[in-house]
Image (tube, rainbow, N blue to C red):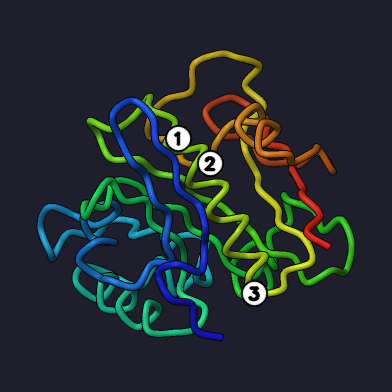
Amino acid sequence: MVLDLVSIPNRWQGGGMAIEVRPASLFADVKAVVGPKRPDATVCWCLSYRIPAKQNVELRGTARGELVQELLAQDPPPGVLAYDGGEAVGWAGVHPRADTSFARNRRIPHVDDLDVWSVWCIRVRPGYRGKGISHRLLQGAVDFARSYGAPAIEGYPVDNQGKKVDLTMAYVGTRKLFEEAGFTRAAGTDSVLNGFPRVLMRLDLR
């Protein structure tokens, strides 16, 4: 199934901003949010959980961006983007869990045998943070998974109990963020990030 730009009805007007969340399709826009300043730099590109660990370690420099371009041409694409007008201001990585490293992650359990989707990264560009965009991205990821018939969607945020999370680790989200989107705690995990335990949050889409 191919989605056009209006297949995810996720728009929000607030704080002088009109935010729209769309399936990621344009490489330049993905690069603006998760790419490096230097094309040859080895940065995550939101691939760390999307591809096998060995491939992630071996993939260096411009090869990482090239792989992202390949993934964007696939159906489904590897995530959604938030736009303020025509500018990409945020990203959420979301995909069927079976095609991510979470399929084999021993620290994060499988609750059941459903073909669930995972949302593992929520990133907002500097200058746009604190405006509620992460909430719109998470809802957009939910709508995206639902549009592909996902029976449920999971996230693995930190349970920080209101304490500050280092910005470099904040991409996984917080338990509160997921709860406000309707997710509930389905299981604990053996994963810890920035000193906080991660929890498995689940939203049934059936």
The residue shown at (46%, 74%) is 77
Task: Please state the horizontal and vertical placement of residue 140, each as a whole percent of the image.
Answer: 53, 53
Q: As drawn, is 72 to the left or to the right of 51?
A: left
Q: Identity of the amino acid at label 3?
A: Tyr
How much space separates mark 3 and mark 1, taking CA atoms?
Answer: 29 Å
Task: Please state the horizontal and vertical placement of residue 88, each as a whole percent of the image.
Answer: 26, 52
The residue that disc 3 covers is 148
Marks 1, 2: nearer the viewer: 2
Quadrant for residue 187, please give it: top right
- Residues under numbered marks 1 and 2 in contact, where contact means CB atoms less than 8 Å apart: yes
- Give the secondary structure at mark 2: helix
The correct choice, above or below, for 114 with respect to 93 in the image is below
The residue that disc 1 covers is 169
Quadrant for residue 116, please give it: bottom right
Q: Identity of the amino acid at label 1?
A: Met
Count of marks, rendered view: 3
The correct choice, above or below, for 162 with respect to 114 in the image is above
